[in-house]
Amino acid sequence: MFSVSGFSQVDSARQVNKPRLRGLVIGGAAGYGIALAGLNHLWYADTRRQSFRFFNDNAEWKQVDKLGHVYSAFYFSYGTSRALQACQVPVRKGDLWGALTGFAVLVPVEIFDGFSDAYGASTGDLIADAAGSAFYLGQSYLWNEVRIHPRFSFHRTDYAPQRPNTLGKGLPDEILKDYNGQTYWLSVDVDKFIHFPKWLNLAVGYGAQGMVYARTSQNLAAGYGTPYRQYYLSLDFDLTAFKTRSKVWNTLLFVASMIKVPAPSIEFSARGTRFHAFYF
């Protein structure tokens, strides 16, 4: 996605590790190709190809799918920036290239959608991709660190068996496709703003239920109820607070921190307010 030579003109105090950077580019490209092949198998295996087209899906799935794009772009940006900095790329340059890469790697998903008869490329998805990258880059420029972390959680629902071709067949498929089971969170490092335990965060979440079909009108026409939005307030645990000198351990913590740890949560929705002792 970028040229190794583009990072050669840097301060003498921090020279780019070109062999490591070259390995990152080659390994990243290979892993990215494998990931796209897997996505094509999981998501598009049951769809037919069509001429490329755009499709306005902004009113679908209560916008849970759009948060998925924001989340993905954010972590592609964040992860790429950290990898570049490990190759001695300057922080500001790594953040910028990380954000650009985070957006660029999701563009092929829209190309896949554009050629699929079940979808179509979405301008809303592209805006969400850009928002995720900008959310990372903005925090980096404002605070020189990430203080508000997107998180993801998933639980299986009874909706997927009702439309398995759309909502998924089996757990890996359902995690990607069943938006009823997905919750997206913003976990705030409160200790970065006020005196607070470093390992404890506060998180707000968003999800939706009752979506057998993408649009409310389709749901009602098929005899199902009205889908509704869910909002959450929860505690969260900052796993990165337990860093050590081990790069492997710290990397594992970084990956694990993308997932919201089950914790007590309060749910607010059109159905009322509920307390969950451990929500995931």
Image: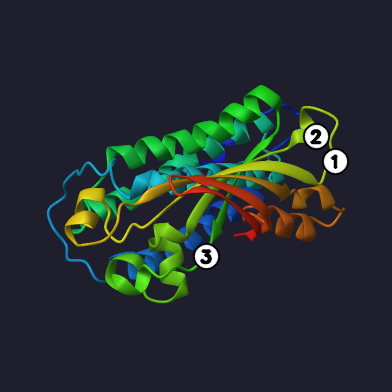
Query: Can residue 2 be seen in the rendering of this structure?
Result: no
Between residues 82 and 43, which one lies in front from this camera angle? Answer: 43
Could you say which quadrant of the image residue 211 lies in?
bottom left
Residue ranking furthest to the front: 272
Q: Residue lying farthest top?
A: 142
Badge 3 is on which residue? 155
Q: Which label's residue is closer to the chain start, 2 or 3?
A: 3
Q: Nearer the viewer, residue 221 or 1?
A: 221
Q: Secondary structure at mark 2?
A: helix
How packed mark 2 is, by other alpha carbons closer than 10 Å (few <14, some 14-19, many 20 or more), is some
Q: Which residue is tagged 1? A: 197
Q: Is residue 194 above or below residue 169?
A: above
Nearer the viewer's eye, disc 2 or disc 3?
A: 3
Question: On screen, 179 above or below 156?
Answer: above
Q: Name the kind of residue labelled 3 in the image.
A: His
**Which image quadrant is residue 93 in?**
top right
| Cα distance in 3D space between marks 1 and 3 | 28 Å
- Tell me the crowding category of disc 3: few under 14, some 14 to 19, or many 20 or more residues within 10 angstroms, Cα based: some
Image location (x, y in percent) of residue 208: 42, 51
Q: Which mark is residue 41?
A: none
| Mark with earlier residue (1, 3) | 3
Q: Residue at x 28, y 71 (%)?
A: 165
- Horizontal placement of 96 versus 110: left or right? right
Describe residue 127's horizontal placement relative to residue 194 as left or right. left
Q: Quadrant of the C terminus?
A: bottom right
Q: CA distance from mark 1 to mark 2?
A: 6 Å
Residues tagged 1 and 2 counted as in contact (Cβ below 8 A): yes
Location of mark 2 (residue): 191
Please state the horizontal and vertical placement of residue 95, each as a whole percent of the image: 60, 34
Residue positioned 42% across, 68% down in the render: 174
Residue 3, given in percent of the width and then of the height, sits at 50, 41
Specify the amino acid type for callout 2. Answer: Asp
